[in-house]
Image (tube, rainbow, N blue to C red):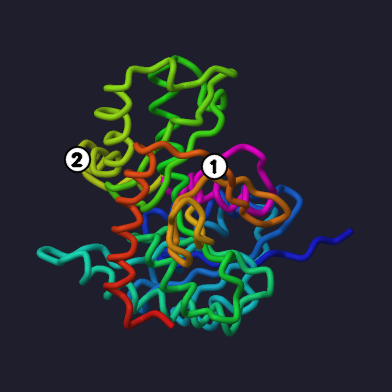
């Protein structure tokens, strides 16, 4: 049986994250090794030439699953018939710029992209926002696409989740795959809450195997500030690990996963997170949808940390209120 190609949009296609992301998509790491893909590369006009160079390299890689590459600076063209979208391109914070300014400037990017998705994407569209501030950028895009189900819009918390697994594995001398029920709550920012309360490793409770001081004073801030640490050491941002996490997120969303992972989804009001905010939550992926793990009993420490994220996300929402429907 012939399988129809899936169209996947990558914005900011000439950037560093996309450069690591596109080869994984073309190799079949999202939909699987039996599904052909078409790539749609969206860039700003002055970067289209660089995107054409990226497309040339992709073509030269002779991926058997890669059936077509489209390059455009027009969102309506890029998202026409799209089945999945990685919204990577975003405006970085300028010197002396406040977070509210950053949010407003990115709103000018993500609102039109959300509108283009609303009017042109396929019925099964899935959107992952990678460009920071990812949670609120996802909210802007989602609010600009009123005809698309809200649960089709997500933001990347899988990088934070993977960082948490990596730090734990190094601490306890086990593999990252040995852990279950790790979650990173809230915002992809320094406020985020990597939570080990429910985590297990090989059937044992992680919280019983680690020192509370290490957990609170080293693990949590280390995961939350890992991006800044990498910039300081490497001299540039963590592009490859972000791309890898984006692949993990979209693959699980499409193909399913019963293992707990952290995904920033549109809140339904669970765990005191205001309905409509895009926040990191414990999830599994079933039947092409993210399902939030329900019924968890939270202690005061967890509630306090989650509340700090809610307050930050509400402040960000207020900063872009003029862009929301």
Inspect this view and state whether residue 56 appears. no
- The numbered mark at residue 232 is 2
Q: Is residue 251 magenta?
A: yes
Q: Give the image quarter of residue 241.
A: top left
In the rendered image, the quadrant that contains the C terminus is bottom left
Front position in the image: 147 or 77: 147
Q: Residue at x 39, y 51 (%)?
A: 186
Please tell me how crowded label 2 is: few (under 14), some (14-19), or many (20+) other residues with Cα within 10 Å.
few
Instruction: Check disc 2 and report its element: helix, strand or loop.
Output: helix
Q: Residue at x 48, y 77 (%)?
A: 114
In the rendered image, the quadrant that contains the N terminus is bottom right
Stretch of the chain drawn in magenta: 242-263
Q: Residue at x 50, y 29 (%)?
A: 199
Q: Give the image quarter of residue 279.
A: bottom left
- Answer above or below: position of 197 versus 103: above
**Disc nearer the start of the sequence (1/2):** 2
- The numbered mark at residue 261 is 1
Front position in the image: 227 or 199: 199
Tell whether 4 sits left or right of 77.
right
């Amino acid at each position: 049986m012939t399988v129809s190609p899936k169209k996947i949009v990558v914005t900011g296609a000439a950037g560093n994250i996309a450069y690591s992301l596109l080869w994984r998509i073309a190799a079949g790491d999202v939909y699987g090794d039996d599904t052909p893909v078409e790539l749609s590369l969206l860039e700003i006009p002055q970067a289209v030439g660089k995107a054409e160079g990226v497309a040339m390299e992709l073509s030269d890689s002779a991926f058997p699953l890669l059936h077509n590459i489209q390059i455009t600076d027009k969102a309506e063209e890029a998202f026409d018939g799209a089945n999945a979208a990685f919204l990577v391109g975003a405006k970085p914070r300028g010197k002396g710029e406040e977070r509210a300014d950053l949010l407003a400037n990115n709103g000018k990017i993500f609102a039109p992209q959300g509108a283009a998705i609303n009017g042109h994407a396929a019925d099964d569209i899935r959107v992952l926002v990678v460009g920071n501030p990812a949670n609120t950028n996802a909210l802007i895009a989602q609010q600009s696409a009123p005809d698309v189900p809200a649960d089709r819009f997500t933001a990347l918390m899988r990088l934070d989740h993977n960082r948490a697994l990596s730090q734990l594995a190094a601490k306890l001398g086990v593999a990252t795959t040995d852990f279950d029920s790790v979650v990173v709550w809230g915002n992809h920012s320094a406020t985020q809450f990597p939570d080990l309360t429910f985590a297990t490793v090989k059937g044992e409770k992680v919280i019983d195997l680690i020192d509370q001081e290490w957990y609170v004073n080293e693990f949590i801030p280390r995961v939350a500030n890992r991006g800044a640490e990498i910039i300081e050491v490497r001299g540039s941002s963590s592009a490859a690990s972000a791309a890898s996490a984006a692949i993990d997120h979209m693959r699980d969303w499409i193909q399913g996963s019963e293992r707990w992972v952290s995904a920033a989804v549109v809140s339904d009001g669970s765990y005191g997170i205001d309905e409509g905010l895009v926040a990191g939550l414990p999830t599994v992926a079933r039947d092409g949808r993210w399902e939030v793990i329900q019924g968890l009993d939270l202690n005061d420490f967890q509630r306090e940390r989650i509340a700090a994220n809610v307050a930050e996300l509400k402040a960000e929402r207020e900063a872009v209120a003029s862009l929301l429907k």
